[in-house]
Amino acid sequence: MASRRILKRDINYVVSDLILDCYACMEEQPEKDFSRYEQIINDAIIMKEDLYERINHFDPSKHGSSKDYFLTIRKDLFVWMTQAYENLKALGS
């Protein structure tokens, strides 16, 4: 059970960090349209909720090995966060 808690804490940390970075970019560039930053923030919240849902509904008979299942969740988080930061970087230019 502790690994689920730690995984949720990690997800919360990186999503919160992304949201703070979006707000920092919005503050640095007040003349830009904020709708694209808001879209990144909304996508981050949706992704966080989706990952939490996947963590909470792990079923060994359906999903197999817990190690592989939770490793897949971590990989999905990494891929999504990489894409989100690339989008944020593209907005800053």
Image (tube, helix red, strand yellow):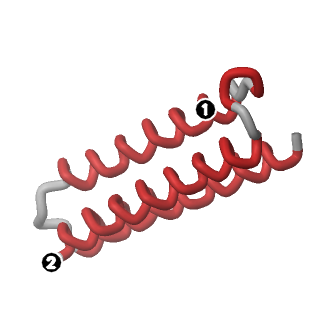
Q: What is the quadrant of the N terminus in the image?
A: top right
85 relative position to 50: left or right = left
Q: Earlier in the sequence, mark 2 or mark 1?
A: 1
Q: Residue 84: which disc?
A: none
Q: Is 51 rendered above or below residue 18? A: above
Residue 15 horizontal/vertical position (percent): 51, 54
Question: Disc 1 residue type?
Answer: Arg
Residue, x 62% and y 35% (percent of image)? 52
Residue at 68% x, 47% y is 68
Viewer-proximal residue among 39 and 54: 54
Quarter of the rendering containing residue 57? top right
Kindly state the secondary structure of the residue where label 1 is placed.
Answer: helix
Of 26 and 69, nearer the camera is 69
* Residue located 50% across and 51% down the image: 76
From the top left corner, tell me how far across and down residue 43 is, in percent.
36, 43
Spatial CA distance of label 2 from label 1 is: 35 Å
Which residue occupies the foreground of this view, 41 or 79? 79
Select label 2 or label 1 by which is in front.
1
Residue 69 spot, x, y in % from top left: 66, 42
Q: Position of residue 7 (x, y in %)?
A: 71, 51
Label 1 CA crowd tier, 10 Å (few <14, some 14–19, many 20+): some
Q: Residue at point 35% right, 66% down?
A: 85
Would you name the residue on which mark 1 appears? 54
Please indicate whether residue 71 sits to the left or right of residue 84 in the image. right
